[in-house]
Image: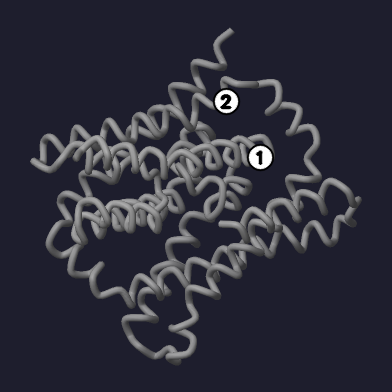
Amino acid sequence: MTGIVALIAFLAGVLLAEVGILPSALTAHAERIGFGALCWMVFAVGVWLGTQREAWRQVWKVGWWLLLLPFGTLVVSSLSAAVIGLLWGISPALAAAIGGACGWYSLSGVAVAKRWGAEAGLIAFSVNFLRELLAFGLVPLVARFSPWAAIALCGATAADTTLPLLAKATNAQGAFTGLISGGFITASVPLLVTLLAHWSR
Amino acid sequence: MVWLVLALLAGLAVGFLFRLPSAILQWIDCSIVFSLILMLVSLGIEAGNEPKLHHLLDHRWGLVVALLGIVAFASLLWGWVLERGLRKP
């Protein structure tokens, strides 16, 4: 249900922008309004997580194995994208950098454009932006069968934008795992993109 | 990013240190859905106002869909396989 609401909300925003009935002041500040809402959401999830002490213990029990989830997500995202790059006739390093960004569209767009040009940057932005949207649509459905699959799909966004959705779709343990996984990926993406850019020179 | 980390840490501190009444916790829970909707409408407005995105999706949509599809599928598969593997005794 939350996934459908999320997609409808996004499409409503696109429609409002396309029709052009919004005051220009509102359109100009859409990014700030969205960021304010995101900050509140992350704060609210933090409050909720703070009350879930039993979940902290459960996550602690899993231990270092937990890091296999974000590390593997980075590796499989990069490698699978590199295969598509080979099949499509574009640089595998570029494709790996696009896939390895794991949904962090703002960083990947700029970082990829800097090394491979504006069009590549825009492709990186689109793929990662759509990955976040796909996560919003699929997480409530996927989380019923496998919370870790839902967290892996969210990639870097599991630590910020999709964290509230993970908290709703799974449980406190799932939200903690998402936070740790998303945090690890967020910290690793700049390094991965830089390494791939350096390697492809 | 700094603001998000601060917001999360502040939320964790409030949740961990204070015993909040259930009415407030329920209100916070509801506010998550409303802020999610507000954030996504804003994101949609931003996307709708981005002409370069339209142009790209018109011309390179095949590559974008292929990359998105394979990356999403591989991530889902990895999460599922790892979760199943760790559950085994």
Residue B37 falls in image quadrant: bottom right
Q: Which dot, 2 or 1, sits closer to the camera?
A: 2
Amino acid type of the residue tagged 1 in the rendering: Asn
Rendered position, A64 above or below A118:
above
Q: Is residue A60 left or right of residue A33?
A: right
The outermost residue toward the top is B89
N-terminal-most mark, 2 or 1? 2
Q: CA distance from mark 2 to mark 1?
A: 16 Å
User: At 49% across and 15% down in the image, what residue appears?
Assistant: B85
Rendered position, B38 above or below A201:
below
Q: Specify the label residue B65 is tagged with.
A: none
User: At 46% across and 58% down in the image, what residue appears?
Assistant: A4
Mark 1 element type: loop
Q: Which residue is mark 2?
A: A66
Could you classify mark 2 by the number of other residues whose Cα lies within 10 Å: few (under 14), some (14-19), or many (20 or more)?
some
Residue A69: where, in percent of width, then height? 49, 28
Rendered position, B79 above or below A65:
below
User: At 47% across and 45% down in the image, what residue appears?
Assistant: A156
Amino acid type of the residue tagged 2 in the rendering: Leu
User: At 38% across and 34% down in the image, what residue appears?
Assistant: B75
Rendered position, A18 above or below A25:
above
Residue A124: where, in percent of width, then height? 28, 53
Residue B66: where, in percent of width, then height? 20, 44
Quadrant of the drawing holding the C terminus of chain A: top left
Q: Which residue is mark 1?
A: A171
Could you classify mark 1 by the number of other residues whose Cα lies within 10 Å: few (under 14), some (14-19), or many (20 or more)?
some
Residue A44 falls in image quadrant: bottom right
Q: Are marks 2 and 1 on the same chain?
A: yes
Mark 2 element type: helix
